[in-house]
Every structure is written in structure tokens, then in C-alpha cells.
Amino acid sequence: MPDSSKRTNRRAVYETLRHKVVTLEYPPGAPLSENELAASLGVSRTPVREGLILLSQEGFVQIFPKIGSFVSRVDPRKVADAQFLREAVELASLEDVGPAPDPEVVAELRDNLARQRQAAGDLADFFRLDEAFHQGLLRLGGHESAWPTVVAAKGHLDRARRLGLQDATPPQVFIDQHEAVLDSLVSGDVAQARRLLRAHLRAVFDDIEQIRERSPELFASNSGSVPVRRSIAVWQ
């Protein structure tokens, strides 16, 4: 039988590498050395190599024989696909929010908004609260169980969102949009909430265009070209 500890170790390495890519700790175009990664993670090269292969299958890593592995540049097409899925789920869920939304969940979302305002200067903390807010919106519609599926599907979108927070749209704009969506739901205007949420979720496309104008090297253009290292701020 296969060694379950090896499977667990392999999975842990993959999840760690994926998290570092999605959170921009490993920025678009960054070279990935198997030896250095293995040393930093305290594992052999085998699970690192296997993790990089899995990430390449997801489009997060490019592997060039005899050259090396690199974090993939942000691909606007993959971002659009992920955003499409997220929008479909979240807007559909709003349709099931009743005329009197659960007051306990509404109170949790109000508290979340207050903490978002306090964390606006800490992008990593704000992103975490942003995620919790959208998960709460699904809970209002009775579809919180769909959130893990949404999270698993939106890795490429999340990279673009983080870049946008760093270099395009400040958190305060998104906090105000969150509040407007919640206010509409509480007042019973689901149609307005859907319109506001749709515009909110699509803001990432404007951010991409702004960032691509300033830093085109972060974005995919020719899938066969070898990325060039670029240093950007690490999220902490």
C-alpha cells in the first residue's frame, strides 16, 4: 500500500506552495528553485517537484525543461473564468435572501464591516475580512456550503484582487460597496443588492487594466516566454 505519510507530506507541500503563489508571497514571474524550496520547507525535492507539477496543471506555475520553474504571470482569461463562476454563485444566492434577513447574520456582517474599516491599512487582514464578508452573504442566502467550492475555483482571481489592492483600488472603496450591498438586502431590495454586488465583483477587471498599463510584465502575453523576476511587496 502507498505510504499515507508520504501522501500527506506531498499534499502539505502542494498546499503551502499554492498559498504562497496565490497570496503573492511568490510574485508573478518569480523563479522557483526545487533545492531552495525543499530546504525552506524541510522536505526532499520529490514532494516539491510533485507540487510544482500540480501547480503547473492549475496554471499557477510554468515549467521549462533545462531552464527551470517560474510562477506564472497573471492570465486575465483565467481571472475572467474564475470571476464568472464566483459571480454566478454569489448573485444566485442573493435571490434566496428572504424579506427579513437573519438578524444574527446581519449583525455579524455589520461587525465584519467595522473590522474592515479598522483593518483598511493592513491589506492581508482586510483581504481575510473581505472573504469572510462574502461568505456571510452566502450564509444569508442559505448557501454557505458553496463557499469552499468558490474558494477552490478562484485562485487566479485572488491573485489579481491582491494586486489590485496593492496598486489600484484602495480598501475603502470596497468597504463602502460591501455596506451598500448589505443595506440593500436589509431594506428588502434584492434587485438593487444584486446590481451592486455584480458591479463590485467586476471591479477587478478595471484594476487589471490599470496595473497592466504600469506593469505589463506581471501579465501573461506569450505563454511560451520565460518569465523575468520582478519584486513586489510581500503580504504579511
Image (cartoon, rainbow, N blue to C red):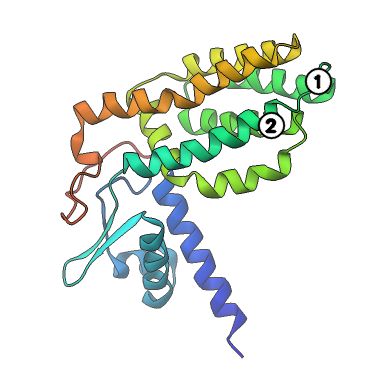
Residue bearing mark 1: 101
In the image, 69: left or right of 38? left
| In the image, residue 66 above or below residue 152 | below
Q: Residue at x 40, y 40 (%)?
A: 79
What percent of the width, then of the height, locates residue 181?
62, 16
Q: Quadrant of residue 216?
A: top left
Q: Residue at x 35, y 61 (%)?
A: 56
| In the image, residue 26 above or below residue 11 | above
**Label 1 to label 2, Cα distance in Å?**
13 Å
As helix, strand or loop, the secondary structure at mark 1 comes to: loop
Q: Earlier in the sequence, mark 1 or mark 2?
A: 2
Identify which residue, 21 or 136, lies in the foreground.
136
The label nearer to you, 1 versus 2, is 2
Farthest bottom residue in view: 1
Within-10-Å neighbours for mark 2: few <14, some 14–19, many 20+:
many
Q: Residue at x 38, y 46 (%)?
A: 25
Q: Please name the amino acid that badge 1 sits on.
A: Pro
| In the image, residue 160 above or below residue 224 | above
In the image, 134: left or right of 37? right
What percent of the width, then of the height, locates residue 225?
15, 54
Quadrant housing the C terminus: top left
Can the viewer see residue 192 in this picture?
yes
Quadrant housing the N terminus: bottom right
Residue bearing mark 2: 93
What percent of the width, then of the height, locates residue 234?
36, 40
Within-10-Å neighbours for mark 1: few <14, some 14–19, many 20+:
some
Number of marks present in the image shown: 2
Farthest top residue in view: 187
Q: Please name the amino acid that badge 2 sits on.
A: Ser
What percent of the width, then of the height, locates residue 49?
36, 72
Q: Quadrant of residue 207?
A: top left
